[in-house]
Image: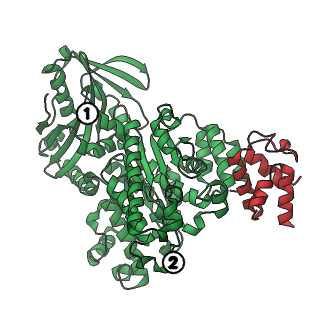
Amino acid sequence: MDEEIKELVAEVFNIKENDVVPTLSQDTLDNWDSLNHLKLITAVEEEFDINLTMDEIDEITNIEKLISVINLHKS
Amino acid sequence: MDKLQKQQLKQAEDWAELVDVLRAIDEFNSREIELAFRNIERLKEGSDIKIAFLANHTIDLLPNYLSTLSARENLKTENYIAPYNQYFQEFLTDSSGLLTFDADIIYLDLSIPYLSPKINNSFLQLDTEQKMQELDRIVDSMQQLANLAKQKTGAILLISNFVQPSYPQAGIADFQLGFGEAEWYARLNLKLIELFRDDPRVFVVDKNNVLARHGKTASTSAKMYYLAKMELNEHALSALSAELVRYLKAIKGLSKKCLVLDLDNTLWGGVVGEDGVEGVKIGKGYPEGEVFYDLQAYYQSLKQRGVILAVASKNNVEDAEEVFQEKPEMPLSLEDFAVRKISWDSKNNSIAEIASILNIGRDSIVFIDDNPVERELVKNSLPEVSVPDLPNDPTGYLQVIRQTDYFEKLFLTEEDVSKLEQYKQNAQRQELQNNVTDIGDFLNNLGTRLTIEVANEKQLPRAHQLFTKTNQFNVTTQRYTTARVEEFIGDENRELFLFSVADNFGNMGIIGLVLVELEAGQAHIDSFILSCRAMGRGIETAVMNMLKDRYLLNGEKKCLTAKYIRTHKNKPVETFFEDQGFSISTNKNNDEKHYLLEKVNAELLECPDMELVLEINDG
């Protein structure tokens, strides 16, 4: 996984970088509440200089999807 | 924030270190705010100020910004965010988070889109009467909320005003409408000002202007607004927090007292010693002259706000004074400065001397100098002094200086407006003192008139100011809130005395207070405060004589008790009670002493000749 994403996710959810795995999701992580979801989105948009759509923001329910959305915008 | 700064944040070991790291960071993006906030929470022990946030839009990120900017001022905040849109319920339910939180400050931020969808979406479908009804309804709610806040809490209430939309629904024809959108918002905001102007516990925060400063269209992210009812983006949160920090500093009494100015290239363009009086640039009619004219006018306005002005300049006195004499059109004249140190002495020495002449702490001083070398010298040798960095180009000075929040106060009292006069009178008193050899003669001949009165409602702002701003002559340094002070005034078990001093040189206004708690058989001095301007002339002894007389010699009490709590600033009163004849009852530790004075031991002490006016209603 991209180190940058790992670091960012770890920072937003206040968890260890090693714990950032593709399967990490809103269901498995208590910290992933609606407020932290917004913080995640804001941080991602800021960090990668991209603009996510409302649908994409809704879709990002786990790290795997987050990575694919970011990659889609970067390519 | 760079990688190193991130590391430093994470590795900071104590609060002081964290504050230093935070101060070195210029800007925070939203991610960095989170990181900063997390480390603030990790290292702060206790809090200096408790803030509750109430809103009808998502405001959950604001506290993190505010905590971070406050930490840069060495202020620890504790935050409570009320559940979304429950601002009335929070006041009306005794067990609510808000009421159990016991806030020092409540920040209420309501926005029109949720408060009045009609105004927000269908302004053009409303007739004048309907628009007026909406306006009145909102004003009524604000009034009710303010009343609730005052009844149910002891907090100071900060209410944000309403943000006028960037684009009116009628477009450029808005001003031509009978009652347009711009007018509606202006009236609403004007009503708020009028409603709370004289209320010592409610203050309107000019959010409309704060966002305008930053740019309203750049203050919001439409996506976040629709996704999360989040109206303010990270830039707006940052700007709003910076504004709120001004209030926190004012409430916590952290504002500075004195502005020390350099002369050459700071008050005027050029160097008088080289360019001559004719060569220095100041005045209307040409670009460089106007830059410095406006700067001087701004310093003049600071003086009107109660800031003491002083000069520290390396110059020949004659040269410097000649500029003021030859250019009377300058906004500042020699008389505007309470102290002038114009010599070839180093700036740090001059500033230290100014602090000692004015009898103020060095941490109450802001120093402005165009020369980065001088600024560095002062920063390094007098770290307590605030030294703003200035850009190379003088046209940028005013912007930088206006942005600073050194001198913020919640309101200007009469004492503020006449402060310079008082400090100058003090300097004159000092001069007289230097010319007489006997201090007793000097004090006896000042023509002092001391008035001691029981505090009333009107004096609440000044009383509160004395509680929060006096550092040196303050025996217990209890920083009471306005609400608490208000309670003291009506409390029959307490007596709050204010004292004011006038003499041959002028009127100093209210310069001190004593708060006494009445108990069966004894009276306890909870606070004894004297402004540093009035120290060293026996006022405190005269006041103490009054207390001894009132409670012991001619009163019913068996004894007077008191306390001294050490701070790093109140050394001047370390032995005050001993000096006044009290004996130590308990020596809790090195930092707290308890005192007792029994009726049999009470005697009035000699103090300088003065006229005593007692306006105390014995009931």
Question: Residue B81 placed where, x, y %?
Answer: 56, 43
Q: Residue furthest bottom?
A: B285
Question: Residue B482 placed where, x, y %?
Answer: 35, 41
Q: Are marks 1 and 2 in contact (CB under 8 Å)?
A: no
- For residue B490, which numbered disc appears in the image? 1
Residue at the disc numbered 2: B171
Q: In this image, B220 relative to B365: left or right?
A: right
Numbered circles on residues, count:
2
The front one of B175 and B355 is B175
Question: Residue B290 placed where, x, y %?
Answer: 39, 79
Location of residue B483 with respect to B221 vertically, above or below: above
Q: In this image, A66 relative to B508: left or right?
A: right
Location of residue B332 with respect to B424 vertically, above or below: below
C-alpha gap between disc 1 and disc 2: 53 Å
In the image, what residue type sits under mark 1?
Gly
In the image, what residue type sits under mark 2?
Gly
Residue at x 20%, y 33% (from the top left corner): B543
Residue B275: name its quadrant.
bottom left
Residue B40: name its quadrant.
top right
Q: Is residue B315 visible?
A: no
* Few, some or many residues within 10 Å of mark 1 (<14, 14–19, 20+): some
Give the chain letter at badge 2: B
What secondary structure is marked by label 2?
helix
Name the quadrant of the N terminus of chain B. Answer: bottom right
In the image, the chain rendered in red is A
Location of residue B505 with respect to B263 vertically, above or below: above
In the image, the chain rendered in green is B
Question: Residue B319 placed where, x, y %?
Answer: 33, 73
- For residue B367, which numbered disc appears in the image? none
